[in-house]
């Protein structure tokens, strides 16, 4: 979709910005590199050519919806030492375009603060969110939002029905965009529903993820830009993130122009008073990413005025006489369905048992097959795999969502799963991108780390006198199948005898934080080298040989002798 800029800028500033952007873009992508609809680069990968029936292939967050092409003025805003009467903080004054509505500006800054804490290596500047917000929706239509940040009316892009735009069939049953037939970009940051479904965030803490709320949308956009461990302080990585948001070089240059402008200074304006852009990339002067719907024309009714007859109150003017209809042209041939439209269901493709020990990779991968009604495999269909549940497991690369294109047999295999530290079950869901079809759910299980052998790291006898303390601390090493067993859970108990593993009520003991006697330690964990060093042991007045038993997850058991005897005279 060609972009039409509504203003030509003269001078070196625009040339420099465009040259830097294009040069950085060229440097960031090697020949033959393509991206999937999550933005991953894959050299030489065969990807669809942009058929939007695949769910917005290459369309990023917005489905490549129209955007405002107005450029910032040549005169940059200048910082001012004056302070805001409301906050007492310095503000900037300058051109009207430098003003950002108060709530919208607050949303961008809160999103930057959250990303600074959760993904500090991303280095997301709030001015980048402001630049994208300006280009996508004119800062939520000049800040027409309520106190919670929700727009007074939905901001909707045009139908992505293939008529001048991408073709993306409905993916949300109209839940976000109100359109049960085709998707539309939604909200201040213009997310398409299929992207919002997994990328949405709750930025204002109300328990909802609303694309029409500027706090939610700004935070979602920040996380979207920061994926794949990007560092946005590196120009090539920032360019890649912007292009992933909307895949257009003209879009990239426009966003970078506003970013440069906002970095030189902005000022806060009241909500609803922001400057609205007027030029859109959909080639219609004055068009907006949220176009109004024209009112339907009312057909004439028998008995009303006829062509050529003056209407009452018209001053005698007449309607033009209609011309005879032009010869009808032959009906166009029906458009053949896309591969995605022919998919009827997903079938499992021999997925193995999904189990892994905490911190390790799963041995099996989720594999599904897209099939038609005739149960034939359908190639070139995008399948989305999503990790669902209370887990820190991810796909290789650290993402919880991955999109894969089916091969010639209709099969798509998800990237390898990597278990985190949380144990238990979670779900991997496979769905077809661009179709509302039932998906497939797979249960994956993360088991605790294990050890099958425990040994002491020293053979020194552990002895003590009554009422004293043991000179040496008990130190053990855990292994599993001969390899170091790090981060394995363990317990240690001073037991009554080899045949009675209940806790002893006399003999050696540990001390808790308050100095009280305890004879069982729980929540112990071996270190990364498999080593477990127990706290210092003490002896009461009882003498004899006592037993300390240590157990680990996985069945490793070790019993250690402790001797308490009076000192030799």
Image (cartoon, grey):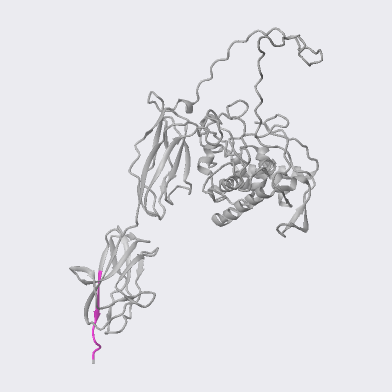
Pick the front one: 151 or 530: 151
- Where residue 219 appears, x then y in whole percent? 58, 48
The residue under the point 66% across, 31% down is 291
Vertical side of 2 occupied by 327: above or below = above
Q: Does the image show residue 23?
A: no
The residue under the point 29% across, 76% down is 509
Q: Does the image show residue 185?
A: yes
Vertical side of 34 occupied by 361: above or below = below
Asked where in the image residue 154 lies, by quadrant, the reply is: top right
Pick the front one: 175 or 504: 175
Q: Is residue 9 left or right of residue 203?
A: right
Vertical side of 454 occupied by 142: above or below = above
Q: Is residue 14 left or right of residue 49?
A: right
Pick the front one: 253 or 548: 548
Q: How many marks?
A: 0
Q: Is residue 509 left or right of residue 514?
A: left
Quadrant holding the N terminus: top right
Residue that lies at the very extreme toward the left in this rendered image: 499
Quadrant holding the C terminus: bottom left
Q: Is residue 535 left or right of residue 276?
A: left
Span shown in magenta: 559-568
- Where residue 245 appears, x then y in whole percent? 60, 41
Asked where in the image residue 411 lies, by quadrant, the reply is: top left
- Secondary structure, magenta segment, majority class: strand
Residue that lies at the very extreme toward the bottom in this rendered image: 569
- Where residue 283 appears, x then y in whole percent? 70, 29
Whether the magenta-drawn stretch holds residue 322 is answered as no
């Amino acid at each position: 979709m060609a972009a039409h800029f509504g203003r030509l800028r003269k001078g070196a500033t625009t040339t420099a910005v465009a040259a830097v952007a294009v040069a950085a873009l060229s440097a960031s992508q090697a020949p033959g590199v393509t991206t999937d609809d999550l933005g991953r680069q894959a050299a030489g990968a065969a990807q669809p050519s942009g058929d939007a029936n695949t769910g917005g292939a290459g369309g990023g967050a917005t489905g490549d919806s129209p955007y405002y092409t107005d450029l910032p003025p040549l005169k940059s805003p200048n910082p001012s030492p004056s302070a805001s009467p409301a906050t007492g903080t310095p503000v900037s004054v300058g051109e009207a375009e430098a003003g950002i509505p108060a709530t919208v500006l607050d949303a961008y800054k809160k999103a930057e603060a959250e990303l600074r804490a959760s993904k500090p290596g991303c280095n997301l500047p709030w001015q980048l969110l402001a630049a994208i917000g300006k280009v996508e929706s004119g800062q939520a239509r000049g800040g027409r939002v309520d106190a919670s940040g929700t727009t007074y009316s939905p901001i909707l892009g045009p139908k992505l029905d293939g008529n001048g735009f991408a073709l993306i069939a409905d993916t949300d049953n109209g839940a976000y965009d109100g359109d049960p037939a085709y998707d539309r970009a939604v909200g201040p940051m213009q997310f398409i529903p299929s992207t919002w479904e997994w990328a949405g965030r709750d930025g204002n803490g109300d328990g909802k993820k609303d694309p029409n709320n500027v706090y939610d949308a700004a935070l979602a956009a920040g996380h979207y830009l920061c994926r794949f461990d990007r560092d946005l302080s590196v120009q090539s990585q920032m360019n890649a993130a912007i292009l992933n948001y909307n895949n257009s070089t003209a879009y990239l240059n426009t966003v970078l122009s506003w970013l440069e402008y906002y970095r030189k200074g902005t000022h806060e304006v009241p909500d609803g008073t922001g400057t609205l852009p007027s030029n859109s990339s959909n080639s219609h002067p004055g068009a907006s990413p949220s176009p109004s719907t024209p009112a339907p024309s009312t057909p004439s009714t028998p008995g009303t005025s006829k062509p050529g007859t003056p209407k009452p109150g018209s001053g005698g003017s007449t309607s033009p006489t209609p011309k005879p209809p032009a010869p009808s042209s032959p009906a166009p041939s029906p458009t053949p369905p896309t591969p995605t439209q022919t998919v009827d269901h997903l079938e499992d493709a021999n997925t193995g048992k999904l189990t892994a020990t905490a911190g390790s990779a799963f041995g099996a991968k989720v594999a599904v097959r897209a099939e038609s009604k005739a149960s034939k495999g359908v190639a070139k269909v995008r399948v989305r795999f999503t990790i669902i549940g209370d887990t820190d497991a991810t796909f290789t690369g650290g993402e919880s969502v991955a999109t894969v294109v089916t091969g010639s047999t209709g099969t798509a295999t998800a990237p390898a799963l990597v278990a985190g530290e949380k144990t238990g079950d979670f779900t991997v869901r496979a769905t077809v991108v661009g179709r509302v079809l039932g998906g497939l759910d797979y249960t994956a299980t993360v088991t605790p780390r294990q050890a099958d052998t425990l040994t002491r790291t020293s053979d020194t006898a552990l002895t003590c006198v009554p009422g004293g303390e043991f000179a040496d601390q008990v130190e053990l090493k855990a292994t599993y199948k001969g390899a170091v067993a790090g981060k394995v859970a363990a317990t240690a108990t001073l037991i009554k005898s080899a045949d009675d593993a209940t806790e002893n009520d006399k003999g050696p003991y540990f001390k808790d934080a308050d100095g009280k006697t305890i004879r069982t330690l729980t929540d112990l964990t071996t270190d990364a080298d498999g080593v477990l060093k127990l706290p210092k042991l003490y002896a009461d007045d009882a003498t004899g040989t006592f037993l300390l038993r240590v157990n680990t997850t996985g069945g490793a058991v070790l019993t250690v002798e402790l001797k308490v005897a009076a000192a030799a005279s």
